[in-house]
Amino acid sequence: MTRKKPIADIVNIFQQVRSEYGNCIVDFGDDAAALDSGNDDVILFAADGIWGRLVDASPWWAGYSSVLVNVNDISAMGGRPLGMVNVLASNDKKACIELLNGIKDGISKFGVPMVGGHLHPDTPHSSLSVAIVGTVKKDCLIRSDTAKTGDMIIAAYDMDGKVGPNSPYSWDSTTMKTPAEVKKKYMVMQTIGEAHVVTSGKDISNPGTLGTLAMLLETSRKGAVVDLEKIPVPPGIDFIQWLKIYPATGYIVTSPQKEANKCIELFESVGLTACVIGEITADLKLTITHKENTCHLFDFAKDIVTGITL
């Protein structure tokens, strides 16, 4: 989460020209930018750079993950991913081939093509960044800055998996599944968007369950109360480890109380585990409770994750 803080300085540089983004519905602070195409479809546009430590530790997994994380960014907005491009840098032929094989296997698993990119063949390091485009119907777009006071907070995970390679904070729930199974799970957010049962949402990413919720609250200018005992955990996994883990296929969404059960049913219909873990408040604090204990994890009147409020 601390690695997110420099984002605020970057966004501030662009503040003077944000008025030029005439066709932009959502820009900084969400899983993907949303661009108005002039009709009922919204273009979703996102990019992710893969952490250098992961590239060095496991090039294949880094390549595979570059597909996974980008597909999740489109999925989280209720969208359908269309295609990706990459920027790859490496003078290590073996590492480069492993990275590309990971990307190839990710394409096969998630069903989203890599349609181009750029290669730096002579750098003293290996790095990989991927960008993706997708589409969503304008009235089905799921944003992260639109949570409402009184909404139920729902956490949803694919718990059929295992701790991933190279890190105790990576969860692999896709490599052992068929492409059809994987697609069914990540496309559930399109179904949820079309059903209009959520007010906001994000995919659970590197900041973990509570960190991802904190980013949603920050952009929505809201607070929340979360009961830690209600967060589901896979058997045999330490609770604190699970809070920090990147769950591969996992989402935090907010739902009106009357729609929460329907939202949970839609998640469960594709094999995800989902439940209400808390409620959105108006007090700008992320409060966590456990039995009789309570503490404020964030006070957004003074604390920042990314510093972005849309």
Image: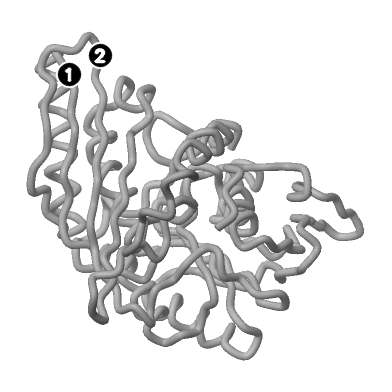
190 over 209 or under it: above or below? below
The quarter of the picture where residue 222 lies is bottom right
Helix, strand or loop at disc 1? loop
Which residue corresponds to the image point at 82% horizontal and 50% vertical from the top-left?
296
What's the residue type where badge 1 is placed?
Answer: Ser
**Observer-nearest residue: 247 or 163?**
247
Label 2 to label 1, Cα distance in Å? 6 Å
Element under label 2?
Answer: loop
Q: Residue at position x 62%, y 90% from top?
A: 258
175 above or below 272?
above
Q: Amino acid at mark 2?
A: His
Residue 90's tag is: 1
Residue 149 locus on image (x, y percent): 71, 74
Q: Badge 1: few (under 14), some or many (20 or more) residues near its Cα, within 10 Å?
A: many
Q: Which numbered disc flags the more N-terminal residue, 2 or 1?
A: 1
Toward the right, the furthest residue is: 292
Q: Residue drawn at (63%, 70%), measured in percent from left and top?
A: 153
Residue 93 position within the rendered picture, expressed as x and y whole percent measured from the top left:
9, 17
Determine which residue is flagged by label 2. Answer: 125
**Farthest residue, direction bottom:** 258
- Quadrant in the rendering for residue 266: bottom left
Nearer to me, 148 or 268 = 148
Indicate which disc residue 179 carries: none
Task: Answer left or right for 174 relative to 161.
Answer: left
Where is residue 155 drawn, in percent x and y?
56, 65
Q: What sort of colour scheme is used for the picture?
A: one colour
* Left or right of 185 in this view: 306: right
Position in image of residue 42 (x %, y %)? 28, 71
79 or 14, which is in the foreground? Answer: 14
Quadrant of the snapshot with the C terminus: bottom right
Question: Do callouts 2 and 1 mark residues in contact (Cβ within 8 Å)?
Answer: yes
The residue sitting at 33% across, 41% down in the picture is 48
